Image: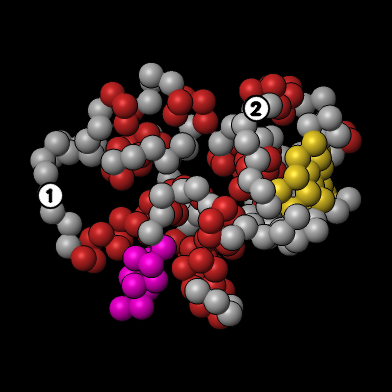
Amino acid sequence: MARYKDEQCRRCRREGQKLFLKGERCYSDKCSVSRRNYAPGEHGQKRTKLSEYGTQLREKQKTKAYYGVSEKQFRKYFDMASNKKGITGENLLQILESRLDNVIYRMGFGTSRAQARQLVNHGQFEVNGKRVDIPSYLVKAGDTIKVRELKEGNITIKANIEANNTRPVPTWIERNFETLSGKVIRLANREDIDLPVEEHLIVELYSK
């Protein structure tokens, strides 16, 4: 999969808002959006008016950045959402929220989705008792996620638990730091998703 290899903070500055791609740094005074709230590059401080297409494209790029997915993956999720019953935009966000790396982040075992993705890649978690090392694995209602017994002493996970102990957990997820586990009670609804995404713009973009 093609990966974005430039400075992550540039993506936040491009969208003009925090995408929370670097964990604790995003909440500190070091956040680039707080210090330089304009687009990166030589002409970043010039005001430009986006066309309708440009607005739709930026919304798609922003959503991709939030969840850390490639263009190919994002298109695949959109097609899945289109084939499901219900509102396509809401279905798309529900699928993105169901990714294992996002669920790990939501539970507080990772300080960012990128870190959660790395932890999953390194085989730190199991789903329903089976080791899963695929960040894009889509969880289902009733799935139990747990830190593997061999990895319970992981320093990074322990530090994250201490840092995220008071972080609120979405109502569709249960978390138990004592047993290093959590459960997906149900899939996320639109009102559960706190990201400032206008999904109808993405649907309009792909409908052209």
Q: Indicate whether residue 172 is drawn in magenta.
A: no
Image location (x, y in percent) of residue 8? 41, 36
Whether 169 is drawn above or below 157: the answer is below
Q: Position of residue 70 (x, y in %)?
A: 48, 57
Q: Is residue 200 magenta?
A: yes
Local SS, label 2? loop
Q: Main secondary structure of the magenta part?
A: helix
Where does label 1 land, which residue? Answer: 48
| Residue 181 position within the rendered picture, expressed as x and y whole percent measured from the top left | 81, 40
Query: Residue 161's x, y, as percent?
Result: 70, 27
Q: Report which quarter residue 200 is drawn in.
A: bottom left
The residue that appears at 30% across and 63% down in the rendered structure is: 56
Identify which residue is drawn at 11% across, 44% down.
47
Camera sees residue 121: no
Q: Can residue 84 be seen in this snapshot?
A: yes
Colouring used for the render: secondary structure
Of the image marks 2 and 1, the number of the one nearer the N terminus: 1
Name the secondary structure under disc 1: loop
Circle 1 residues within 10 Å: few <14, some 14–19, many ≥20: few
* Residue position for label 2: 166
In this rendered view, identify the residue nearer to me: 188 or 35.
188
The magenta stretch spans which residues? 199-208
Q: Quadrant of residue 164?
A: top right
Q: CA distance from mark 2 to mark 1?
A: 40 Å
The residue depicted at 54 percent of the width and 68 percent of the height is: 91
Q: Amino acid at mark 1?
A: Thr
